[in-house]
Amino acid sequence: MLDRVSNTPVLPPEIARRRTFAIISHPDAGKTTLTEKFLLFGGAIQMAGQVRAKGEARRTRSDFMQMEKDRGISVSASAMSFDYGKNRFNLVDTPGHSDFSEDTYRTLTAVDAAVMVIDGAKGVESQTQKLFEVCRMRDLPILTFCNKMDRESRDVFEIIDEIQENLAIDVTPASWPIGIGRDFIGCYDLLQDRLEIMDRADRNKVAESVKINGLDDPKLADHVPAELLEKLREEIELVRELMPAMDQQALLDGTLTPIWFGSAINSFGVKELMDGISNFGPEPQVQSAEPRKVSPDEKTVAGFVFKVQANMDPKHRDRVAFVRLASGHFKRGMKLTHVRTKKVMTIANPVLFLASDRELAEEAWAGDIIGIPNHGQLRIGDTLTEGEAIRVTGIPSFAPELLQVVRAGDPMKSKHLEKALMQFAEEGAAKVFKPSIGSGFIVGVVGALQFEVLASRIELEYGLPVRFEPSQFTSARWVHGPKAAVETFANANKAHIAHDHDGDIVYLTRLQWDIDRIERDHTDLTLSATKEMM
Ligand code: G4P
């Protein structure tokens, strides 16, 4: 059945109450702090500071490695479920470092909306802009939180202009700040005509809320100093005259973002943002797949793997596949078909991620993220169904931008190295290419820091010291075309050919000119910088 207004399916209440989203931001804007406050108000933690290391610590390289070592923590932070009011929130973490943009891209395929956090003093920063572009490619609805309003910030009209211009999206203020920096006292809630007063003394306290009967209400003067009140009235008048009003459909279409002003560290504005996600945020959406789309209200279960995390416990080589349920009502012990291999898997120990704990998932609904421990059968892009051969689409793999040769410190251990590399390739942490000629492997990544992380993980998880050395190649392209033509081409160009971990043929070169020439000379072949994971 379709909703008459939005033309989307009317979902069962258990599914309709789900809100699955990610937070995107530039490092330091306050993502960790905001996440913590979400969990606090969602009742998932009792105290701020419980979730994981502070922002500053995470940014140094050695601590980043330490965090990678501490698999348990980083995994439980990858997806967090908690209830807020009548809603179930599934917050999916995006890796903060810009070197992990591919992982981030895939994470964004598993959510229905994004919260964009910006620093009120800095506005739209580079990483925010990049992540926003990814959301735009998927038309994801975006809710904006302008943080750190307790400190000196930029002029509010200027911030809104910057978002509109740099990101080409309409902005509607959901709240309006009163005073700036030290004079900041709180916000006027434009959606509900309320005054929200910040309590600087208690950082975990919810703001005092006063119902106001429009801007002429004498109650305003009881809470707002005269000079700020006059400015507030003028500004709100301007806002209502010049800026678009809240429009849920425009938000859902990805053309309008509501903005809340607040201070995550002071818990201020956070509840209003959460209410915004509850009231206006999207329900679980239809998932693109072949040969047909999957709608969340379908009776049978379908889900897809968007992330694999290996070696959570180095003693047991187990992996957890993060699965976004696209439809149905999942129950523990269900038998699901792994579409790629056509094998049936009994999902005996699925986990739900509740703040810092993992818990067995007795049941889950479309929109939820569950973790499935496995021994390597589940890969990124895989689909699980109750039998139908559906393949979820739109989870890409990008050609790496940096290639290096990897060598084991101990040549006797090259078999172990191969195993470790395959594992990381399947996890999506790197591309691994086996050249047709010669021995050894070429590893490709998107950002240089990934080489360091890989070297440290191979040593830690497999006890193998490795070195990365420059490769003669700088670009990798998947060769697509009729099977016979691809094979003939590969045989004639052996010095440039390698196989990726799926056995697909890749052309390696250092010259863009080479790629252009091949495409010109071989009209039946394409050299592609992306490959769809399947
Ligand atoms: P991130 O995950 O986006 O990188 O940011 P994170 O939450 O770690 O916050 C970055 C810094 O900004 C932290 O300070 C944090 O305390 C501070 N911060 C977050 N929200 C607010 C806010 O509303 N107002 C103000 N004034 N500061 C805020 P830090 O010095 O790096 O760490 P810490 O020692 O304060 O924990």
Image: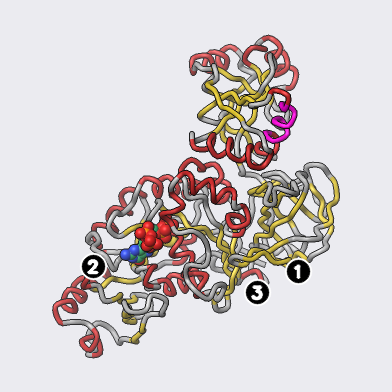
Residue 273 quadrant: bottom left
Query: How far is disc 1 from disc 2 in space, using C-alphas?
Result: 47 Å
Q: Is residue 345 left or right of residue 479?
A: right
Near mark 2 (Cα within 10 A), the count class, few <14, some 14-19 or many ≥20, is some
Near mark 3 (Cα within 10 A), the count class, few <14, some 14-19 or many ≥20, is few
Residue at figure coordinates x 41%, y 54% from the top left: 56
Query: How far is disc 1 from disc 3 in space, using C-alphas?
Result: 18 Å
Counting residues from the start of the chain, the first of labels 3 and 2 encountered is: 3
Foreground: 466 or 432? 466
Near mark 1 (Cα within 10 A), the count class, few <14, some 14-19 or many ≥20, is some
Query: How far is disc 3 from disc 2 in space, using C-alphas?
Result: 42 Å
Identify whether 138 is placed above or below 496: below
Q: Which residue bears the numbered disc 3?
A: 13
Residue interval drawn in magenta = 413-421
The residue carrying mark 3 has its beta carbon less than 8 Å from ligand 1: no
Give the label, 1 or 3, closer to the camera.
Answer: 1
What SS does tag 3 mark? helix
Q: Amino acid at mark 1?
A: Glu
Q: Which residue bears the numbered disc 2?
A: 181
Judge whether residue 419 is colored magenta.
yes
> Which disc is residue 362 wearing?
1
